[in-house]
Image (cartoon, rainbow, N blue to C red):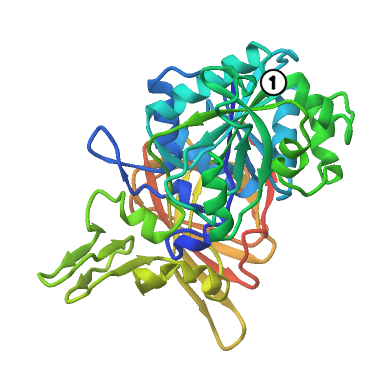
Amino acid sequence: MQLILLSGGSGKRLWPLSNDARSKQFLPLLASPNGGMESMIQRVVRQIREVKLTDNITFATNAVQRDSIINQLGEDVNVVAEPERRDTFPAIALAASYLTKEQKCNDDEVVVIMPCDVYTESKYFATIAKMAEAVENNVADLVLMGITPTYPSEKFGYVVPEYIQSTESVFNKDCLRVARFTEKPNEEKAKELLKQNAFWNGGVFAFRLGYMMNIVNQYIQTETFQETQKRYTEFPKISFDYEVAEKAESVAVVPFSGEWKDLGTWNALCEELPSTHIGNVMMGDNNVNTHAVNELGIPVFCNGLKDVIVAASPDGIMVCDKQDSEKIKTYANKLTTRPMYEERRWGTYRVLDNAEYEDGTRSLTKTIHLNAGKNISYQLHHHRSEVWTCVEGEGVFVLDGERKEVKRGDVMNIPVEYLHAIKATTDLTFIEVQIGNPLVEEDIERFDYEW
């Protein structure tokens, strides 16, 4: 079985901790079994491996999130990055093309699609195994997971099965024929759907690879995966539900009844935080139902607060009544400037200062952490010079082809348009000061270098 995990989203509902580059699934806010902290994506992959569902995991994501996935899960995961964001159908189509053309999987291979940020339990993955078995037994071309509703939600799409008491509707004890789909209803319509034994659409789908590739080939027919990537914009910008699920003639649903949560809002996330406060936070004696998360070096003190969320990161500070916390999505775009913290495949960086001077020159100061054995690419900048000061660890620095070993206290001056790179021998931290205009991540030209 091939498992494709969908990783997308812009993270606006969990501002200021999340942003376009660092969506909710990458926030290390959940308790892990080893006593530390883990992100949603790390939790899901750990659960998949613990239940031995499959070793064949591929991530379908966008280019911005590729490095975060590799940084959190390691280099040995398969990541298929879409050239631009075009909704779930193109992303799944691209991942299916990768399995066919790069991994050489055959058309009979069972593929399961699932979100990477679901908060759930082991029974969820047992349900996925049942879905895969249903596809293998040719129960239906497309099999999806139906979440047993706990209330008449307006936030989810619904799957309506054929009348459950009808023997014709039952393929086996775990699988029902799908009568129709209903998009996000109002509350009254949701109540009617619950009376019809409808399920929430959990966004989990199983099918044979050949089934999906027949749909892919209706839009793009190529010999190689690279060609499919280049022609990615020829796929329609549409969801998998609209393009595939609702058009499928043979669809079944496997019910799941168990713990299942979307931690995409502050209210939902706070219910699963291991403590009322995370990071450099001091809580007073008079707080009621208040949570605080602080990623800054400076302390945060909370006292006399009721039903409040306090969140602080390099991107900003939010103090909000829990009842109104979902409204942050409306304001996030106005509050966001540039990413102030990012994960890369080599480590992380955090912006410390961003300033502009009277003559128009700008400076940007970062602290950069390289994991041992990793390196920043051999590159040059056309609009800025840089000064690097090593504060921890050891590494090898390259400037226009000349190499030298560096350690704590060493300063590296990099003039405009000089080729440079650095590789960490041990975990390495240095302070980077950029000077110039404009100071943007796109001002970079990369070259090959043999370490």
Q: In the picture shown, does residue 165 fall above or below 64?
A: above
Task: Classify the position of the N terminus by image quarter.
Answer: top right
Q: Nearer the viewer, residue 82 or 451?
A: 82
Element type where label 1 sits in the image: loop
Q: Is residue 291 visible?
A: yes
Q: Position of residue 194 (x, y in %)?
A: 52, 46
Q: Position of residue 411 (x, y in %)?
A: 42, 56
Residue 203 image-quadrant placement: top right
Q: Nearer the viewer, residue 414 or 28?
A: 28
Q: In the picture shown, does residue 118 fall above or below 15?
A: above
Q: Nearer the viewer, residue 422 or 43?
A: 43
Residue at image position (42%, 22%) is 49
Task: Classify the position of the C terminus by image quarter.
Answer: top right
124 lies left or right of 190: left
Residue 50 image-quadrant placement: top left
Going by the picture, which residue comes out furthest to the left? 285
Q: In the picture shown, does residue 6 fall above or below 157?
A: above
348 lies left or right of 213: left
Q: Position of residue 391 (x, y in %)?
A: 34, 53
Q: Position of residue 308 (x, y in %)?
A: 29, 70
Q: Disc 1 marks which amino acid? A: Ala
Q: Is residue 336 visible?
A: no
Going by the picture, which residue comes out furthest to the bottom? 358
Near mark 1 (Cα within 10 A), the count class, few <14, some 14-19 or many ≥20, is many
Q: Nearer the viewer, residue 448 or 271?
A: 271
Residue at image position (64%, 10%) is 137
Residue 247 image-quadrant placement: top right
Residue at image position (52%, 20%) is 174
Residue that mark 1 sits on: 140
